[in-house]
Image (spheres, rainbow, N blue to C red):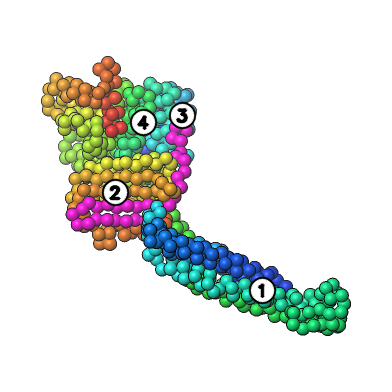
Amino acid sequence: MLAEDSVLLREGIVGLLGRYGHEVVSAVGDARALIAAVEEHAPDIVVTDVRMPPGFQDEGLHAAVRLRERRPALPVLVLSQYVQRTYAAELLDSGDGSGVGYLLKDRVGQVEEFIEALHHVADGGTVVDPEVVRQLLRRRRDPLEQLTPREREVLALIAEGRSNSAIAAELVVSEAAIGKHIGNILTKLDLPPTAGTHRRVLAVLTYLRA
Amino acid sequence: MHMHPRNVWQAMSRPGFLLSAWPWRSAAYLLTGAVTGAAALVGIVTAAAVGGALAVVLVGLPLLVLVALGGIPVAVVERSRLRLIDRDPVSGRHRVPTAPGLWAWLTTRLREQATWRELGYALLFAGLLWPVDALAVTVALLVPLSLVATPLLLATVGDGHEAKVLKQWTVTTWPTAFGVAVLGLLLLGVCAYALGVTAGARAALARLLIASPEGELGARVVELARSRVRLVDAFEAERRRIERDLHDGAQQRLVALTMAVGLARLDAPPGPLADRLTAAHEEAGKALAELRELIHGIHPRILTDYGLQAAVDDAADRCAVPVDVDLELPGRPARAVESAAYFVVCEALANVAKHSGATRARVSGGHRDGRLFLDVRDDGRGGADASAGSGLTGLADRVSVLDGRLALTSPPGGPTLLHVEFPCELTEAADRSA
């Protein structure tokens, strides 16, 4: 399910997804059509642009948030031209924060990473664009102030939707060390020890709202 | 059809003056002048006497200050009275106080010339002008009217035998009585002009002393100010249009390009071609990032979509120096104000990062008494100069178009504080969940 008002990009993304064996059940050009098409096709994942007709404001994002209100389990990947965290935060606040992604449109060009992110979101993961995360990293506010630089680095990678092993590979340390860092992060952010994988999502949310 | 006369002088130069409302307007002007002048005299003398007597025990001093300011209300009444015989817009000479609050108002008023001119006028009015007004209106109305009434007096009080004219001459016959009445009517016409001249001269004096000298320019100034606002609005609209065009055009094409190159990269066999494609892909990515920054600088979408608070938060995020934000707005200001305020904050934060050497900055603001205000302060070395070619000069112009004010205090050694405020009402924030 794809919503993008630029025909050029819409065709391009449909082609790209097809190449990786994904079927686009419906490709639409505005927010209202998106909501209607989701009702009709019940897709596995929705990929949508933020700014779309009729108002060319943030209709796409609002449609995504509304869709998530109705179907909290519907994975949504939002493509955007804006680095601002406010947009990402609004999306992640919808539902329980799992199965959502906020990526800059640039990532579509990095084909393999884009497809990987798509899979991650479809599987219920959370993905936040590295550029947005980088901007967040520059902020030095509570509660993130208590985190060590290394822990912040790890949290940034979690926000990007990486698994423990991927993070370990990226930072060239053992997976056990990463597990320890994550434990510290969750404790410092005062996150409940019960909720399993959702705690990672909650950590990302804390990060975005800080 | 000719235009209505703008003031009593113009009215007198027209043929229909005697039958128009203008003589009566002139009389009303002088009559109300006599009444307000007498009231002003009583007020000023009382306050001065009480204040002077109590000055020994210090309580009287504030009262004397009140006397000094007494010209202000008198001038307000006088300016509104001017409208009886002068349709041209009239405004006072007072400046707007530099800050809200009684103290700022008081110091501004006591320091400006207008206050003292108005006091001078009030004293002149209370001491000299109002008796003149009273005399003029009495003589100009009573003399001719009593002449006109001679036949009536002869018929009633005089029993048809005799009547006194102006308590001076005795009239005994009917023809003389009617002759005097006709004379009275003629005199009434002359006196109407006399009233007009007196009232016109009085109004000219009042205008000279207590009205802004640009009285006639006032209308043009208003029009100029409006056209300036229109220009800024057009400038704003243009920025938004450029932002939209870049977003819908160049940016989308560049994304499509990086996607195409990205796919080509995957298809290319390893070797020099793949390397070139990788390089091209990276370049396209950089172009896209630069374009995004450029578009954000022209007109940030976050300002349109989420408003000033979120946009300032974002600007703070982007600043190289850590910035605390304390901004609470219950609604959204007008677009032009929102965007001017945003760009002032951006420019201030850019200056903090570039020149101040500060380790921390703070943006605070809110909306109070119909004004939106924002403060940007830092703990840097100070010595900033708004006129030294910084982007603030242009922004100050933009702020002033919106009747706002921009103030920079930056003593050497710091800290630097930039204050900006705009008169504006907030509209309800759009319901984001709708």
Q: Quadrant of residue B148?
A: bottom right
Q: Earlier in the sequence, mark 3 or mark 4?
A: 3
CA gap between label 1 and label 3 equals 83 Å
Q: Nearer the viewer, mark 1 or mark 3?
A: 1
| Mark 3, other Cα within 10 Å: few <14 / some 14–19 / many ≥20 | some
Residue found 27% across the figure and 19% down from its top: A192
Is B431 included in the stretch rendered in magenta? Answer: yes
Q: A75 or B432, which lies in front?
A: B432
Tag 4, which secondary structure? helix
Q: Which residue is mark 4?
A: A91
> What kind of residue is marked 4?
Leu
Return the chain for callout 4.
A
Query: Circles 3 and 2: CB distance less than 8 Å?
Result: no
Q: B264 or A205, which lies in front?
A: A205
> What kind of residue is marked 3?
Ile
CA gap between label 1 and label 2 equals 64 Å
Please give the range of residues in magenta. Answer: B405-434
Tag 2 and tag 4 share a subunit = no
| Mark 4, other Cα within 10 Å: few <14 / some 14–19 / many ≥20 | many
Is A91 included in the stretch rendered in magenta? Answer: no
Q: Which numbered circle lies on residue A35?
A: 3
Residue B372 can be seen in this image: yes
Q: Nearer the viewer, mark 1 or mark 2?
A: 1
Tag 1, which secondary structure? helix
> What kind of residue is marked 2?
Val
The quarter of the picture where the N terminus of chain A appears is: top left
Residue found 24% across the figure and 45% down from its top: B361
| Mark 1, other Cα within 10 Å: few <14 / some 14–19 / many ≥20 | some
Q: Which residue is mark 2?
A: B376
Tag 4 and tag 1 share a subunit = no
Q: Position of residue B311 (x, y in %)?
A: 34, 43
